[in-house]
Amino acid sequence: MVAVAEMAILSGMLGLAVGEVHFYYLRRRERILKSAERLTNARTLLDAHVAAFDAFVNDPASPEHLKTILVSFGDTISNPKMAHECAHALVKHKRGLASEDALAVIEELDVLRSHRANLAQAFDVSVMSGFFYMLLRWPETAQVFEEAASRIAIDPTRGMGFVAKAAQMQASHSPTRTGNFGPTPAMAGV
């Protein structure tokens, strides 16, 4: 009788252990699938960023100042440290970073949009797809993706503020750049 009771206890313990391992496996599998989906979405955004980036940078009619911002921002999105800093800034600054630089970039894009809408659109697509790629690329920054998307959808100026700040942060961390993009044509003479 004792042997049967011990067998029942051992069988129960074994059942719990198997159940716990199976539960762990299912949770781990779910995290891996979710991560794979996140990275697939990030890859789609990166492809869009690169195509728009190339279209903008390779067109001789693109303003040099905007090319400089786009190149610096391109460096930012592939840097995990900068992505973490941008995500932190996004969470910290609930109202955005609509700085004078961001407003000047928006004004410069509006001027460009009036005569070369395709270039302004390429800049916008490169920036937004790059920004969202940067957030989805790393698990730690993906947590703020939804918050960022909703804020930028409501106020695109806010998104450009974060992009301008991210590009400046990257430029200030780069030994080959000064961290200052100089005056924009929209700011000339001010």
Image (spheres, grey):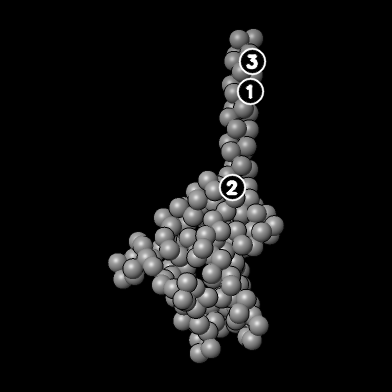
Residue 94 disc label: 2
Q: Which of the two discs, 2 and 1, sits closer to the camera?
A: 2
Q: Which secondary structure, mark 1?
A: helix
> In the image, residue 11 lies at what x, y percent?
62, 24
> In the image, residue 79 lies at what x, y percent?
42, 61
Look at the numbered discs 3 and 2 and tell me whether their residues touch, using CB distance below 8 Å: no
Look at the numbered discs 2 and 1 and tell me whether their residues touch, using CB distance below 8 Å: no
N-term-proximal mark, 1 vs 3: 3
Location of mark 3 (residue): 4
Residue 178 vs residue 161: left or right? left
Residue 77 disc label: none
Please name whichever residue, 39 or 11, is drawn nearer the observer in this view of the structure: 39
**Which residue reaches farthest left?**
175
Residue 133 vs residue 150: left or right? left
**Which residue reaches farthest front?**
190
Crowding around mark 3 (Cα neighbors within 10 Å: few <14, some 14 to 19, many 20+) is: few
**Which residue reaches farthest right?**
154
Residue type, numbered disc 1: Gly
Residue 77 position (above or below residue 25): below
Residue 153 vs residue 87: left or right? right
